[in-house]
Amino acid sequence: MNEGCGSNSCLSFSGALRRSAAALCGRKMPPAPADVSSPKPVDGGWGWMVVLGAHISIGFAYSTPKALSIFFKPIKEDLGASYSEIAWISSIMLAVMYAGGPVSSVLVRRFGSRPVVMMGGLMCGVSMVTASFGSSIVYLYLCIGIIGGWGLCFNLNASLTIISKYFLAKRPLANGLAMAGSPVFLCFLAPLNQYLLGHFGWRGSLLILGGMMLNCCVAGAVMRPVARHSAPPKEVDQSNNAKSKGSRLKKVKTFVDLSFFKDPGFIIYLVGNVMFIFGAYAPIVFLSAYAVSRGVEEYSAAYLLSIMGFVDMFVRPLTGLVANSKWVRPRIQALFSFAMVFNGTFHLLCPLMRTYPLLVAYAVFFGVGFGMVFALIFECLMDLMGNQRFPSAVGLVTIIECFPMLLGPPAAGLLVDIFDDYKYLFFMCGGVITTGGLFLFVMNFYNYNRLEKANRGKETEQNRNTVENQERASREAQMELMDSEVKETNTAQPEYSQLGSN
């Protein structure tokens, strides 16, 4: 808001904003379509072991592209690359991880989450081991970016899908605990990578990291399928053939299901999510380098990522608990919007934090905002789409998100190359994320108003139809009563005439 605005207009705008916020927070999410084809979630039991496996696989999926930034400076010096070229390593890895969503969804529906996660862990290990022998930046794009990105994609999507099969009432908490794997792994991977870099160089560090990522195979092994009830036997073979053909057509359609674009709520979620993804990862990729440019020692700069991950580690499950409460869960989209605005605001403030204690404070608030967003980002999609449509929806969302994921960090690196200053990348990322959060808040408010008006119109029409039907039934009953009275009168008149003649 401009400082020169009049007091009356400021007060009226503030009042309107408060009324809009109250209205949005007071509205409940429309119920997701019920999943009648899947078995009832157990909400516990072996599901908590599945959450542990998802915690490990999701932890590697999200923390690896961030923790690799520790190696960027020696790789840059060894291979003679620019900041923008180095940033493409994480961007390609993240973009492939997101773009492979539909393929991963199809594989999960065909084979289940267990083999898909195990295959993803094997690909991640192989990618890091082969990248340790690289002699060009393009070779690292291929090994780390493409092969490693596909492995992370299999780990992420399959883990998210199986959580939705095991949990319903406790799903926000389960998602929060599983997504907490990202900060937990980042918390120890960042200083560990710095230690390995000092003792083994970036090539030896990638070799060791590849061996560690094979543990995703163990994490996938605990993701056993949910027991399904036996279906009744089919009576006619022709019916079987027709259903199998329909099933194949349905699978082809749900590979990229474009019918989601008919849902305004999905489009609003997608636009805000794309804006967040564009600016989400560049501050992480360049945080250590920014701190070093401010005179911070390299180990201390690496610990900024650990501080962020440590805070994020507690924020995600706490956010899941808050989102699971009966007061917040119907308003989870409003909480998601707030988390995005909170995150973007501190990116805008980061260039003002020039000393190490202030950078530590920035890392703390960064971890809070980042953890809130990622504890809610897939829960909001599940809440909109439901369990049955979620695998296809998350596949479509991730393939679209690959474009901002691919362009965000290189665009930030290009700003650093052009201006030789890191502050512009924080301004760019913070501005885009904050705008996305405000967009979600305003558009969700508008969409809920539209849905309420439509529902009120339907209720009014239904009530009118009910009244008309009741009036019509009443008139018909009266007509029947009158007809019966006329018939009785007509039958009684001959009797009276006979009596008179007698």
Image (tube, rainbow, N blue to C red):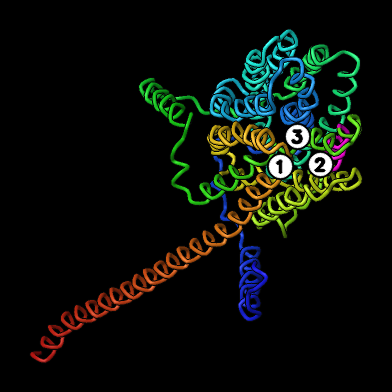
Position in image of residue 478 (x %, y %) = 29, 78
Proximity of marks 2 and 1: CB atoms separated by less than 8 Å: yes
Proximity of marks 3 and 1: CB atoms separated by less than 8 Å: no
Q: In the figure, residue 160 lies in which quadrant?
A: top right
Q: Is residue 286 above or below residue 369?
A: above
Let me know if residue 120 is in the magenta part: no
Let me know if residue 305 is in the magenta part: yes
Residue 226 visible? The answer is no
User: CA–CA distance between discs 3 and 2?
Assistant: 18 Å
* Magenta span main SS: helix
Query: Which residue is at 70% across, 50% downward?
Result: 344
Segment colored magenta? 302-312
Dot 1 falls on a residue whose secondary structure is helix
356 and 16: which one is in front? 356
Query: Which residue is at 66% across, 41% downward?
Result: 279
Residue type marked 2 = Asp
Give the farthest residue toward the bottom. 500
467 and 451: which one is in front? 451
Residue highlighted by disc 3: 286
Residue type marked 1 = Phe
Task: Give me the disc on residue 374.
Answer: 1
Neighbour class for label 1 at 10 Å: few (<14), some, many (≥20)? many
Dot 3 falls on a residue whose secondary structure is helix
Neighbour class for label 3 at 10 Å: few (<14), some, many (≥20)? many
User: CA–CA distance between discs 3 and 1?
Assistant: 20 Å
Q: Nearer the viewer, mark 3 or mark 2?
A: 3
Q: Earlier in the sequence, mark 2 or mark 1?
A: 2
Residue type marked 3 = Phe
User: CA–CA distance between discs 2 and 1?
Assistant: 9 Å
Task: Give me the disc on residue 312.
Answer: 2
